[in-house]
Each structure stands twice: as structure tokens, then as C-alpha cells.
Amino acid sequence: MRYIDSHTEGEPTRVVISGGPDLGGGTLKQQLAVFARDFDDVRRALILEPRGSAALVGALLCPPTDPECEAGVIFFNNAGFLGMCGHGSIGVAVTLAYLGRARAPQIKLETPVGVVTLQMNGANEATLENVPSFVHLADVTVAIDGYPPLRGDVGWGGNWFFLVDWTHTPIRPECIPQLTQVTRQIRRALRERGITGANGAEIDHIELFCSAADTGSDSRNFVLCPGDEYDRSPCGTGTSAKLACLAAHGQLKPGEVWTQESVIGGRFQASYRLDAEGRVVPAIRGRAYICAEGTLVRKPEDPFRNGIPAP
Ligand code: PYC
């Protein structure tokens, strides 16, 4: 399997460009089901140590059903599969452009949750137009040990998020261990209270926000991903859910730019438009850089050929 690694505002993406499993075609949801059922060893070999890392997101290019799309993409990480991935789709677009495989500066990708469009703004920058995003539940309260009740919104941005305005611990790199612990507690509390996304979907991403007036951004976030690693980027799907919340609370108008900073200081420029049905359609602009090209080697005699399982 050949792959190209990039990072988007610090968050890594590994795009499988050849030799990946044949998922038999069909819709992206059908192909994802085959990937999860028959090829989980491939996901683990690509993502887990010793070949990958807990922060890495994989992207398998596969045939799209929509002929207007450059490719279909299935995203995955150390814990399983993602419906969409914002930083990852910017990484895929920069990778396709690097390979000379993009037919035009506008690249359409089919994902299991819908078609997204990437407008290249240069070799290392793209604007993602994401799937429509929305607030599913507003003003939900959860209780966790050691903190007053926390209020937040449940939002969709291609994945499910619980979004909380956070004032208790600085959102700073030195606080990442505490932020990881508290967001894990919040996710557990949501699960225990039966608070879910639509149709009982698990809320598997937790997003904390604080002011970032000190660095000139509108907000700084910390995002816990499924698999318990934090997003080094400001999280494309999480920023999309944030835009939906800002729109719902009358805090950002269509076309206004929101600068979302990550806990390590990466930035996305975000805005939205309303489509014909009045839905929030996010636009997320960010940078990605190619950082490695490789071939995955898995020898039958290697005891860790399929990665080291999480403890
Ligand atoms: O950028 O949407 C994103 C994302 C999801 C998980 C990691 N990054």
C-alpha cells in the first residue's frame, strides 16, 4: 500500500493512494461497511503504532458514485471510522493536487455523510465547503465530578459534537492532560444520561471553547476525538458544528469570518452561507503540508504487522 502523509494545521492525515482494499463499489456508506467488516486489520496497520500514531487520521480513496466527484473518501482513526473529517479532507485535496490528480482547482469528494467541495487557494491551502451543519439539542446540562454543572449544545458538522464554553482550565498546550481528562468525563456523562445525536448516534467528539483575544482569534478550542486523542487542528467538522451554534444563537451572520484557533495555535478561517432550505453550509479555510511518502510493509512473520492495540 502506498500512502502520502500530510498535516493540516498540525493534525496528521495519511492518504492511501494505491494498493488499498477493494471495497466492491456501491455507496460510500456501503463501502465503509465492507471496510469495517472485512479490512479492520488494514485500518489498524495504517493507523496504530509502530507505523502510525494515536493522532493520525487515515483516508482511503475509493470509487465515488457521483461522477462529478474526484474521489470517494473513507476516513478512519485509532478507534474506528469517521463520517467526515475536515482537516483530513483539506489534507486529501492538497495530496491530490500534489499528485497532479486534481482535474480542477475545485475538488469534489464523496464521503459517507455527503459530498464536500474543496477550493484550492494555492498548493498548501484549501477551503472546504462542508455538509450542512446544525444544532440538534441546545442548552443541555451535564454534571461531572469536580466542576459546576456544564451547559452545552449538541451539534452536527459531519460528526457529532458536544460544544461547551469553557472557563475552568486554560485551553493551552500545558493543560492538555487535564483537558483530555475532563472531556473524557463529559463524554462518559453524556453516554450515561443517554444524550445522543439524531437517531441515537453517539456523541463521540467533545469540544471546549474559550476566548482567544490574546492571540487575535475569535476563539480557541480543545477537541477530544474518538480514540481519546485531541485534534491538533481546530477540527473542521467541529468548527462546522460551532458555526451552526453561532448561527442558531444569532452570534455570527452569513459571510462573517470566524477565526477558530486550536489548542496548539493552528487556525481555520470559517464562515457560512445559508442554502435554499435555510441550512448552515460551512466554509473552512486551512493549510496542509505534505510531510512524507511511504509504502506500508506488513510481513506475515511480524507479530505487530496489524499495529499495537490500544491498552
Ligand atoms: O477536522 O473534522 C476534523 C477532524 C475530526 C477528527 C479529527 N479531525
Image (cartoon, rainbow, N blue to C red):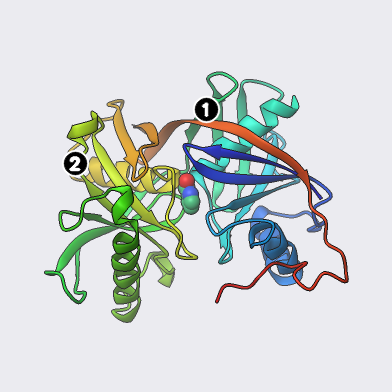
Classify residue 39 by image quadrant: bottom right
| Residue toward you, 15 or 26 | 15
Q: In the figure, is residue 99 to the left or right of 291?
A: right
Q: Label 1: which residue?
A: 126
> For the residues marked 1 and 2, what is the alpha-carbon distance in whole angstroms?
25 Å
Please identify the residue farthest to the front as the structure is shown: 174
Contact between labelled residues 2 and 1, with CB atoms less than 8 Å apart:
no
Say which element carries label 2.
loop
Residue 9's tag is: none
Classify residue 71 by image quadrant: top right
Mark 1 residue type? Ala
Can residue 41 be seen here? The reply is yes
Q: Mark 1 Cα within 10 Å, few/some/many (few <14, many 20+)?
A: many
Can residue 139 be seen here? The reply is no
Residue at x 78% of width, y 67% of height = 305
Say which element carries label 1.
strand
Residue at x 32% of width, y 64% of height = 183
Residue at x 55% of width, y 47% of height = 114
Above or below, comparing residue 158 to residue 102 in the picture? below
Residue at x 87% of width, y 64% of height = 299
Q: Label 2: which residue?
A: 211
Q: Earlier in the sequence, mark 1 or mark 2?
A: 1
